[in-house]
Amino acid sequence: MAHEIPDLLAEVRTGTGKGAARQARREGYVPGIIYGDGKEPTPIKLKYYYLLKRLKAGRFLQTLFNVKIEGGEEVHVICRGVQRDVVKDLPTHVDFMRIHDESRINLFIHVDFINHEASPGLKRGGTLTVVRPEVELEVVAGDIPDHITVDLTGKQIGDVIHINDVDLPKGAKPTIARNFVIANIAAPTGLAASE
């Protein structure tokens, strides 16, 4: 399930604080910081449109990146926050956290539902009600799953799918200890009313 780590190109940002951040924005960059792993924080800047393209591709906060900083350093990071302009909703600052491939981190992982046609409940007109389109899991940084899969084969109207019913990828476990609901198959409104 894990895939190769995508590269993210960055440059070292000289100076910190509001003035340096504004200067970077004027030059067409988004300022950012890489922190953690017991090392000094590294101020960086990313090209604005390059970052915007990555953000629009989706799953930015769930992806482990290999940041290549001009001047040689390469670091594995996970994005911990994107600050956005209140009015324009465009990125103004990015926070990255350094991690090892063996580190365990909490991430929201997308839930995929397959085999809709093999579910008798859906064939009879039932509706798949997704309670959690994403599930927070504790995963190993070097092996982040792209998604988790829920098989709907044999599911009837009234069936409830819990987290314990799903085969989680190796090394992944839910951050919440209880057996929470991911989805259910609800009766169509006409059938529910007649009963």
Image (cartoon, helix red, strand yellow):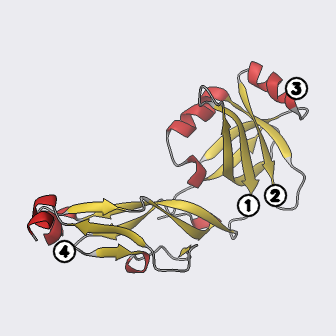
Do labels 3 and 1 touch, CB within 8 Å? no
- In the shown orientation, is residue 179 left or right of residue 92? left
**Cα distance between the residues tagged 2 and 4:** 48 Å
Residue 156 is labelled as 4
Disc 2 element = loop
Q: Which residue is mark 1?
A: 99
User: Residue at (37%, 67%) from the top-left corner?
Assistant: 149
Do labels 2 and 4 touch, CB within 8 Å? no
**Cα distance between the residues tagged 4 and 3:** 60 Å
- Residue 152: x %, y % from top left: 25, 70
Residue 36 is labelled as 2
Q: Is residue 58 above or below residue 76?
A: above
Q: Is residue 114 above or below residue 51?
A: below
- In the shown orientation, is residue 28 left or right of residue 145? right
- Residue 141: x %, y % from top left: 64, 65
Do labels 1 and 2 touch, CB within 8 Å? yes
Disc 4 element = loop
Q: Earlier in the sequence, mark 2 or mark 4?
A: 2
Q: Which residue is mark 3?
A: 19
Observer-nearest of 151 and 83: 83
User: In which image quadrant can residue 48 be found?
Assistant: top right
Mark 1 vs mark 2: give the one in front: 2
